[in-house]
Image (spheres, rainbow, N blue to C red):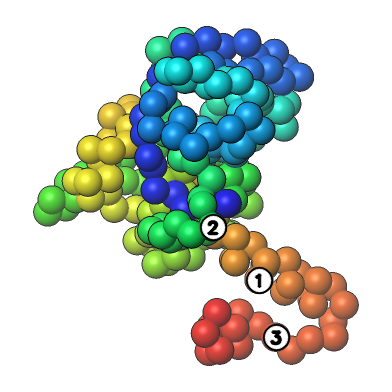
Amino acid sequence: MFTGIIEELGKIRAVTLQKDGGELEIAATKVLEGTKLGDSIAVNGTCLTVTALYADGFRAFVMAESLRRTNLGSLQRGSTVHLERAMAADGRFGGHIVTGHIDGQGTFLSKRPEGQAVVLTIGADTAVLDGIVEKGSIAIDGTSLTVIDVNDKSFRVGIIPHTGGNTTLLERPMGYICNLETDVIGKYVQSFLAKANQKKQSNITMDFLRQNGF
């Protein structure tokens, strides 16, 4: 499990990816602290397993499913990526619950300044947007952000100066394809409602859940 608080910006040093998977070699320092072979590190929000450790970096295995659902397949030598170690049991929970399992991809549509922050609009498929709620949480390339609003084609988030300075989000061009992970609690609620509707044995609705604190 992760929190969506990016610890470090890593640099892709080598890419050995094919359609059925492969490995990435990433230059890093901070995320190496306390890391062992087999541990998990989120790369652009995607949970990957460490397969080799070096004094100045690590290698991670990428499954074919991860290549299909994420932007990892577009990485090249020199690309910058967001890195976060799996949360320690005694660690502080600074963002929100992030699993590292990407739900889909989004496209950067526009950005505009609003005070000291920047409002970023991201387009996504209906299947992803259905899991996004206003003032809820979303992980964009592994970065925990709060949703300003959402419609049937896109959603908006605000990037404060600290987040902008510690991630690549404001450096990305319009049209950039990002990794999106919706809130895990929302996914469980969606699944519960879908099963209840199929069985037609429940009067629980979204209004009922909102009224009861969900």
Displayed quadrant of residue 110 = top left
- In the displayed structure image, the side of residue 125 where residue 114 appears, left or right: left
Q: Under tag 3, what secondary structure?
A: loop
Task: Give the mark nearer the N terminus: 1 vs 2.
Answer: 2
Q: Under tag 2, what secondary structure?
A: loop
Q: Position of residue 177 (x, y in %)?
A: 47, 31
Q: CA distance from mark 1 to mark 3?
A: 11 Å
**Amino acid tagged 1:** Val
Q: Under tag 1, what secondary structure?
A: helix
The residue tagged 1 is 189
The structure residue drawn at horizontal position 54% and vertical position 57%, both measured from the top left corner, is: 89
- Seen from the viewer's position, the closer of residues 75 and 59 is 59
Q: CA distance from mark 3 to mark 2?
A: 34 Å
- In the displayed structure image, the side of residue 160 where residue 2 appears, left or right: right
The residue tagged 2 is 89
In the displayed structure, would residue 195 be above or below residue 187?
A: below
**Amino acid tagged 2:** Ala
**Amino acid tagged 3:** Ile
Q: CA distance from mark 1 to mark 2?
A: 25 Å
Q: Are marks 3 and 2 in contact (CB under 8 Å)?
A: no
In the displayed structure, would residue 208 be above or below residue 152?
A: below
